[in-house]
């Protein structure tokens, strides 16, 4: 049995890595096989330049900076990140529109009243998560469209610090420096800071969750039950808060379970570690359910009506083959047709949409392979959605569109390199869990409404994997001592 479980661990590890490589390779081949693509030559030239000259410069820069005082280097990176992101939002300003306006005006209402009347938020309660967070700052600094962008900049800078911590644990100071630089330079992230949106907040929470998970993993073999319970409850609270902002907490939870019980085999033959893992995951899941229930009750109290628990509308839209699973007016009109019925609650409407989703799946003769393929490319094929949203405020849309996609495909290519190094060295570190998160997020997105900007959090694993690949591409296996096998 012990031999079987270790074999399963190795097989599963390689399978996940190969799935990532397969997905990423499909994106690269599909994108660059279309020679008629707008600005194709410029994009190809840019990606090749970054994969050669950029790769070399990043590697040499990180080697040089590694030799300096680490605290000073980290401080400089933080200042640069803050300066770059802040300069952008102060230079390019835009009024909140569509979804971003919903976030802003909900936050403004919450900053003035404890209970607000907004049935739309009851339909999509995750809007409340970010809006309630933003309302704190609107109450402190007043109602201004610039509050959200500046808060985003602060969150982005905190995220850079957390990326540094994670990358340092995985690949040392060099990898941490490279990952931080990649985050600072990432065009789409910088542009998204202009808007009133939840991505910077939930990604900061996600990174904090990973930092805590890594800390627990390092101590799991000898940690006391008391400390383990504290960490588990903390993680449960953070996961519930993240889910309140963006309902994807199931993805990191499942990734953690797979990593702990299938990939990491240190519990085999060690009852203490096995018990610690069971307690750890058990308390996280139970705590998450309790915290989520309390949060839902709180949102219901603030809205003055029961919130929806079923994601019926999102599933219904996700299986609209004609629209490739994207938002569309007919599906939205159907939701509001039900929601406007006398006496119907948000939960009633979403449950009815869930029934409609089941009918669509069973009776619409959907070509699932084509639908999932289309959604996959909608979700991941480009990173220029931020430019489209910001178009009214930008001075050169083409420049930023090209820059966003060049850098995005540079990340994809170098992240493939990072994963190939992990395969070669049979790495079962936390990098596996981070890699699995990207796959899990992609698979989850195939089942619901899809949009390009929803891959925002997937760029974080790409950055960490890319930084790892850039810094360890030429190292011999025996020199990569940070890759401890499970």
Image (cartoon, rainbow, N blue to C red):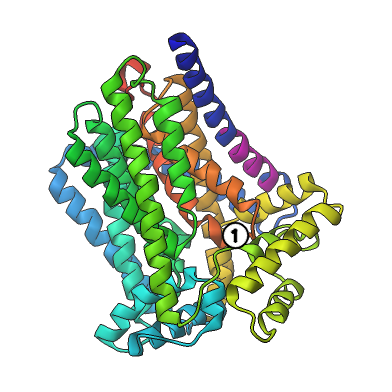
| Pointer 1 residue | 452
Any magenta on residue 22?
yes
Judge by depth and name the residue closer to the eye, 440 or 340. Answer: 340
Q: Residue at x 45, y 26 (%)?
A: 262
Task: Confirm whether residue 143 shows in the render.
Answer: no
Helix, strand or loop for disc 1: helix
Q: Going by the image, does 417 lie left or right of 265?
A: right
Q: Residue at x 59, y 67 (%)?
A: 398
**Range of magenta residues:** 21-31
When asked about the image quadrant of residue 141, the answer is bottom left
Residue 315: x, y in percent? 67, 59
When asked about the image quadrant of residue 301, the answer is bottom left
Task: Confirm whether residue 325 shows in the render.
Answer: yes
**453 up-or-down from 388: above or below:** above
Q: Going by the image, does 375 lie left or right of 182?
A: right
Residue 179: x, y in percent? 35, 45
Residue 376: x, y in percent? 66, 49
* Quadrant into which the C terminus falls: top left
Q: Main secondary structure of the magenta part?
A: helix
Any magenta on residue 385?
no
Q: Going by the image, does 93 lie left or right of 236?
A: right
Residue 339: x, y in percent? 66, 80
């Amino acid at each position: 049995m012990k031999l079987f479980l270790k074999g399963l661990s190795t097989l599963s590890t390689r399978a996940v890595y190969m799935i990532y490589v397969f997905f990423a390779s499909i994106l690269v081949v599909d994108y660059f096989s279309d020679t008629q693509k707008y600005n194709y030559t410029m994009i190809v030239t840019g990606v090749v330049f970054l994969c050669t000259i950029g790769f070399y410069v990043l590697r040499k820069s990180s080697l040089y900076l590694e030799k300096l005082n680490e605290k000073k280097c980290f401080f400089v990176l933080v200042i640069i990140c803050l300066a770059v992101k802040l300069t952008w939002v102060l230079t390019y300003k835009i009024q909140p529109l569509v979804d971003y306006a919903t976030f802003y005006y909900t936050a403004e209402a919450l900053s003035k009243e404890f209970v607000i009347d907004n049935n739309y938020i009851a339909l999509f309660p995750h809007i409340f998560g970010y809006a309630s967070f933003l309302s704190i700052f609107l109450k402190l600094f007043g109602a201004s469209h610039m509050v959200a962008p500046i808060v985003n900049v602060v969150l982005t800078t905190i995220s850079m610090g957390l990326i540094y911590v994670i990358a340092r644990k995985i690949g040392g100071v060099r990898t941490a420096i490279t990952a931080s630089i990649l985050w600072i330079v990432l065009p789409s992230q910088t542009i998204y800071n202009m808007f009133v949106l939840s991505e910077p907040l939930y990604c900061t929470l996600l990174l904090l969750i990973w930092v805590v998970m890594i800390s627990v993993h390092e101590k799991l073999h000898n940690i006391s039950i008391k400390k383990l319970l504290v960490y588990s409850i903390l993680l449960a609270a953070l996961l519930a808060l993240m889910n309140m902002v963006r309902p994807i907490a199931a993805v990191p939870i499942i990734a953690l379970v797979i990593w702990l019980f299938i990939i990491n085999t240190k519990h085999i033959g060690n009852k203490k570690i096995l018990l610690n893992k069971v307690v750890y995951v058990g308390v996280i899941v139970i705590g998450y359910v309790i915290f989520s229930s309390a949060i839902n009750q709180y949102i219901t109290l603030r809205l003055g009506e029961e919130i929806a628990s079923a994601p019926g509308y999102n599933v219904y839209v996700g299986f609209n083959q004609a629209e490739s699973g994207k938002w569309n007016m007919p599906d939205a009109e159907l939701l509001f047709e039900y929601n406007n019925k006398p006496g119907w609650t948000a939960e009633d409407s979403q449950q009815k949409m869930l029934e409609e989703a089941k009918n669509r799946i069973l009776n619409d003769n959907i070509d699932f392979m084509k639908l999932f393929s289309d959604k996959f490319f909608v979700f991941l094929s480009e990173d220029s959605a931020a430019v489209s949203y910001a178009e009214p405020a930008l001075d050169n849309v083409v420049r930023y569109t090209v820059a966003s996609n060049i850098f995005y495909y540079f990340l994809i290519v170098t992240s493939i390199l990072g994963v190939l190094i992990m395969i070669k060295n049979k790495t079962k570190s936390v990098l596996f869990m981070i890699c699995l998160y990207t796959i899990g997020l992609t698979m989850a997105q195939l089942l619901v409404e899809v949009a390009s900007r929803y891959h925002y959090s997937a760029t974080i694993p790409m950055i960490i994997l890319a930084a790892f690949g850039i810094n360890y591409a030429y190292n011999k296996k025996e020199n990569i001592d940070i890759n401890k096998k499970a």
